Amino acid sequence: MTTSTSAAGGRGQGAQDTGYQPDPRRWRALWVTLVAGFMSLLDVTIVAVALPTIQRDLGASPAQVQWVVSGYALTFALALVTAGRLGDALDRRRIFLLALSAFVLFSAACGAAPDITLLVVARLAQGLAAGFMAPQNSALIQQLFRGAERGRAFGFFGATVGISSAVGPITGGAILALASGADGWRWIFYVNVPIGILAVLLGRRLLPRVQGTGRGHVDATGVLLLGLGVLALMYPLVQADSGGIERLWWLFPVGAVVLLAFAQWQRRLVAKGDQPLLDPRLFSTVRGYAVGAGVGTLYFIGFSGVWLVFALFYQHGLGFSPLRSGLAVTPFAVGSAFAAVVAGRMVERLGRLLTVCGLVGVILGLGGTALLLHSVDLGTAPWVAAPVLFLGGIGGGFVVSPNFTMTLRDVPVRMAGAAGGALQTGQRLGAAVGTAALPGLYYLVLGRHQDYRAAVVIALGAALIGMVASLALATFDWQRDRRTRSGGGKRPREVADDPVRSGQS
């Protein structure tokens, strides 16, 4: 297979795709990457329902067991941009397969861990492997597909992202229900092993062998600055349950300063003609990238936190089992899966309008659910709210996959890994904020008023703030697109195919 390394132009392609020849195995290769991506994203939330069992079985403290979830999220986010850049420079296929193999190995290590210390270490390594794997997924989609097919492929990818986040609690609950006994929680990790091994074998056969840019040098200073900046922002959030935000609030301004230094360093490298870790022109000259990254980050602040809030409310407030709690939010996952696949076929025609409509649907769905939980009998509220959650899920399906497509459509294929990694880093930061802030607000209201109904309604209302901010940004971009088309204006120029040689900035 040969691929063009030219910047994608036109309405989702690139300026030149003359060297592109579609790989006949591309759809089968896509399913391999989606299965691997599903496992890595599912592991962000699937473990949460097993934490009480893990704590009891391993004799861990609440702070220790929290690292089983937060440690994975932390190393996942830290790896994304560097992993994407390595995939661009070297070989995406090789990095994907190595990372997937490591993910399987450390999943087995998590399941076999004899104590909490080794479990946390294995989870940190598992998150690092997932972070190296994730940006290769979106980059391989850009490499393998063009035109309307790329929109469809991102539709499946968006469905994977949405479903994996929403069905984590129900999957974990189902595994715990089936694998009874003190060590039943170990199967939450063991289940990755046979699926992962099969994905590795199929990936070796189906993924294309395409070299990267050939520039093996990776900006070590940029890796250090970005890693320290992301770590400073995320560490207080992953420690939120043990008072991390109150104790470590000073890390937020430190992280912001370090990330500003990172941005300045990347501009300096571009000005010198060197290869940056993350080309700043992605945000300034690639149409839609900066807006799409902002939309995704704001959306995930609300999207990620609501599932923990629902789990707390249904299990502690209504006494549901983990499985029943997961089933109560399944309508959202079903609606999201259906809509994401359909959205992939519509995004080329409707563009950012699709994201706007989707965000309106999510706001109506979650807002309607909050109103129902506030007003109807709690015994029937989860089932009365199911149709409204389904509506919210349809909206969610129209947000994630179209936003990926719109954000990455004009990114040159040679930069796809770093761009996808940066996009997902923003989403992981948003998810960290949401999963720290929304349950924290839930517990705050519950502690003051001893009212489960008020706690869940206020937490859902706070989630809507992120959704509304995301809607405002998406609407701005949609209106700007309309003005550009009606006025015959030109779209911003794109990053050149070879910025090092071209010297554009």
Image (tube, grey):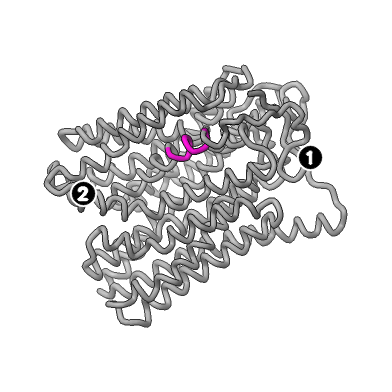
The residue nearer to you, when weighing 317 against 279, is: 317
Q: Is residue 180 left or right of residue 368?
A: left
Q: Which residues are magenta?
A: 29-35
Q: Main secondary structure of the magenta part?
A: helix
Q: Residues within 10 Å of mark 2 (few under 14, many from 20)?
A: few
> Helix, strand, or loop for circle 1?
loop
In the image, is residue 453 above or below residue 288? below
Name the mark on residue 62.
2
Q: Label 2 vs label 1: CA separation?
A: 52 Å
Name the mark on residue 493.
1
Residue 265 visible (yes or no): no
Query: Which residue appears at 79% of the width and 40% of the height?
Result: 493
> Helix, strand, or loop for circle 2?
helix
The residue nearer to you, when weighing 412 against 431, is: 412
Image location (x, y in percent) of residue 373: 36, 76
Query: Given the image, on which type of amino acid does mark 1 rest?
Result: Arg
Query: Which residue appears at 49% of the width and 68% of the height?
Result: 391
Q: Quadrant of the N terminus?
A: top right
Sequence-first disc among 2 and 1: 2
Query: Given the image, on which type of amino acid does mark 2 rest?
Result: Pro
Query: Which residue appears at 73% of the width and 26% of the height?
Result: 19
Image location (x, y in percent) of residue 253: 48, 46
In the image, is residue 368 above or below residue 285? below
Q: Are marks 2 and 1 in contact (CB under 8 Å)?
A: no
Image location (x, y in percent) of residue 399: 56, 56
Q: Quadrant of the C terminus?
A: top right
The residue nearer to you, when weighing 486 against 438, is: 486
- The outermost residue toward the front is 24
